[in-house]
Amino acid sequence: MNDIVIKAEHLSKIYKIYENDIDRLKETFHPFHKRYSKDFFALQDVSFEIRRGENVGLVGKNGAGKSTLLKMITGVLTPSGGTLQVNGRIASLLELGAGFNPDMTGIENIYMNGLLMGQSRDEMNDKIDDIVAFADIDDFVKQPVKTYSSGMFARLAFAVNAFLEPDILIIDEALSVGDSFFQSKCMDKMRKMIESGVTVLFVSHDTYAVKNLCERAFYLHAGKLIMDAPAKDVIEVYRNEIVRMRRELIGEDADKVATLIEEAKLSQADDDTKDFNIPTDAESLSRGKEIFEKNATYNRVQDGRAELINVQLMNLDGEIISDVMFAQEVILRMVVKFNQNIECLGMAYHIRNATGIDLIYTDSRFNKTKAIFDGKRGEIYTIDWKFKVELRQEMYDIACVVSTPIDDKLMDANICDYVPCALQFNLVSPDVYSTMVGGYVHWHNDLKINRVTNA
C-alpha cells in the first residue's frame, strides 16, 4: 500500500446545468427545493490506483474528463462523490502561468514556487541556475511575467516544476506551445525524472508521444474510464475510434486520394532530375549557423579532435529548408572542421520524433565504409547525405555525430562530436498522407502480384 501514490474509488464530479439564469435563481430560493437544473457528469464512477514511479498517459476527446480528473488530483477541484487519496508532493502544468504572480519577475516567481513546494531558500539558491538555464528565456527572467508570451510561460513553468524534485509530475498539453527544440528538452527531462522514480501523469492529443513516453494509459470517454491498460493497447483502441469518427464526418473521397498520389509521383520525378552538387563557398556553409550553434549547446559530447561547425537541411537547389514535403528528396549537410590530424573519420545521423525516439539511423560505415581519410588539422569538409523523406506529418529532430573507429571492423567508435539536436524540420503533406502513413516511416518494397488461378 505504501507504493500507491494516487488512489481513486468511485470518483465523480457533477455540475449543475441551467437553461438560463432565472432557473438558477428559482432553484436557489424555492421553498421546497424544486430542481430547475440537470446534472452533468464531468467524471462518473472512476476508480484506479497509480503506483510510485509509474508513467500514465490520459487520452480522450475534448470534454472527456481528463482535465477535470487532473484538477481533482492537484486539489483545484473537489469531488462530488467517491474518494481520492494522493500521497506525495505534486508539481503540475495544467494551465500556463498558473501559480505565477504576474507582477513579480521570473526569478521572484521561481523562489515563490519553490517555497510553496517546501524548498528552503538555500535549496532554491542551489537550483536557480539550472532552472534559469533550462528555461532559456534570456533577460526576460528578470522581467514581470505579465510581459511573457505563452511560450515563455511554458518554458519557465516546466523548468520550475521539473527541478523542484516532485513525487508526482502532472502535465496537460502545456508543452504544445513551445518550439520543437524546447519540447525535445522537456521530453528528455521527463524521461530522466521517470528513471529517478517520479510518477508522471501526461495528457496529450499526440498519441505517439503518449505511446512512447508512457507504459500505461487511461482512455476517458464522456466522463467514464472505459479502458485502463498498457499504453500501446489503449492508443490502438483510441486511434481506431478517431478514424471511425473521422470517416463518419468527412466520408471517403477516392478521386481526391488518386489525384494527390499522382501529383506526388510527378513531383518526385522532377526532383530526381535535379543536380546533387551544392555550393561549398564560405557564405553557403555559414547559412543557418547561428541556429545550429544554439541548438548544439544542449547535451553535446565532444573530445576536441574534430567538430561539427554547422548542419544544414536543403532542397536539391541548395536552399535551406525547415518544411519538407512527403516523398521530397533533401540534402543533409554536415560541415566538419579538423582540430587534429585524424586518419579516419566516420559520420552518422539519427532522425528522431518529438519524444526522442530514434526512427532513422544512417552511418557511413554502411555505405561501403565511406569516411574521411587522413584529415589534417585546420581542414574543413562537407558531408552531404541525399535521401527521400517519407515520414508521417510531424516535427522531427536530427542528431549528428562524427567519430573515429576503435577496431578494424569499424563496429565500435570514439566520438569526436555528438550533437543530439542539430536541427529540426517539419514534415508537411497533403491530408491523405497523414492518414495513409499508419506508422512513422513509409517503407519501400519491391511488389509483385501474380494471378495463379482463373476465375
Image (spheres, rainbow, N blue to C red):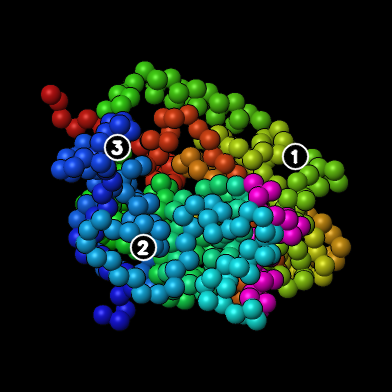
Left or right of 24 on screen, residue 427: right
Mark whose residue sits in front, 2 or 3: 3
In magenta segment, residue 145: yes
The residue nearer to you, when weighing 67 against 301, is 67
Which callout, 1 or 3, points at the residue further toward the start of the chain? 3
Please give the name of the residue rendered at 67% of the width and 38% of the height, measured from the top-left corner.
Answer: 321
Q: Can you identify the residue that label 3 sits on?
A: 25
Q: Quadrant of the C terminus?
A: top left
Left or right of 357 on screen, residue 317: right
Residue 307 position (above or below residue 41)? below
Please give the name of the residue rendered at 34% of the width and 21% of the height, measured from the top-left corner.
Answer: 253
Q: Quadrant of residue 109?
A: bottom right
CA gap between label 2 and label 1 equals 56 Å
Give the label on residue 73, or none: 2
Amino acid type at mark 2: Ile
Left or right of 313 on screen, residue 375: right
Alpha-carbon neighbours of circle 1 within 10 Å: few (<14), some, or many (≥20)? Answer: some
Q: Which residues are magenta?
A: 124-149
Amino acid type at mark 3: Leu
Which callout, 2 or 1, points at the residue further toward the start of the chain? 2
Q: Main secondary structure of the magenta part?
A: helix
Residue 414, percent from left and from top: 65, 73
Alpha-carbon neighbours of circle 2 within 10 Å: few (<14), some, or many (≥20)? Answer: many
Is disc 1 placed on a helix, strand or loop? loop
Is disc 3 placed on a helix, strand or loop? helix
